[in-house]
Amino acid sequence: MDWAVYGALIAAALAVAGAAALLAVRGLQGWRTLRRARRHLARDLAALADSAGRTSAIVERISDQRELEASLARLRVALARLNVLRAALDEAAHPLRAATAFYRRA
């Protein structure tokens, strides 16, 4: 009967030792994973900060519309001049239309 008790104690000790070894291995794996995750997190956060900096520079460049507004003002002036010149050309060509209506073109 003593051998059954001692056998059970030995089996329990082996089970505790196995559980402790498994706990140590899993703890070490968890620690390594945590260190790797922190390293990747730091690198990804740095990449995100760089991307945010580039994005803010692009937004600043796009939102600066002074040059666009100046070009638009010059375009409006040029279009107004073009309309005046067209009107003058139509006015000048109007008397010639009647004379050239019967002129044969080659």
Image (tube, helix red, strand yellow):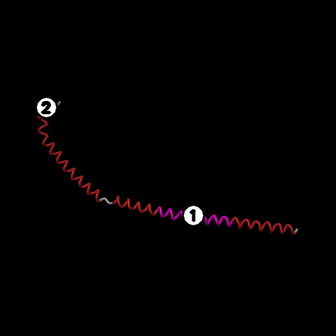
Three-letter amino acid code of the residue under disc 2: Tyr
- Judging by the rendered image, the residue that carries numbered circle 2 is 103
Residue 6 at x, y = what percent? 83, 69
Locate residue 40: give its quadrant: bottom right
Residue 55 at x, y = what percent? 41, 60
The magenta region covers 23-47
Viewer-proximal residue among 38 and 73: 38
Residue at image point 23% right, 52% down: 76
When the figure is inspected, residue 70 is found, relative to residue 38, above or below; the finding is above
Residue at image point 60% right, 63% down: 33
Three-letter amino acid code of the residue under disc 1: Arg
Q: Main secondary structure of the magenta part?
A: helix
Residue 22 at x, y = what percent? 69, 64
Pick the quarter of the image with the N terminus. bottom right
Locate residue 97: give its quadrant: top left
Question: For mark 1, does the 10 Å Cα neighbourhood hold few (<14), some (14 to 19), or many (20 or more) residues?
Answer: few
Disc number placed over residue 105 in the picture, else none = none
Residue at image point 72% right, 66% down: 19
- Judging by the rendered image, the residue that carries numbered circle 1 is 36
Q: Is residue 12 magenta?
A: no
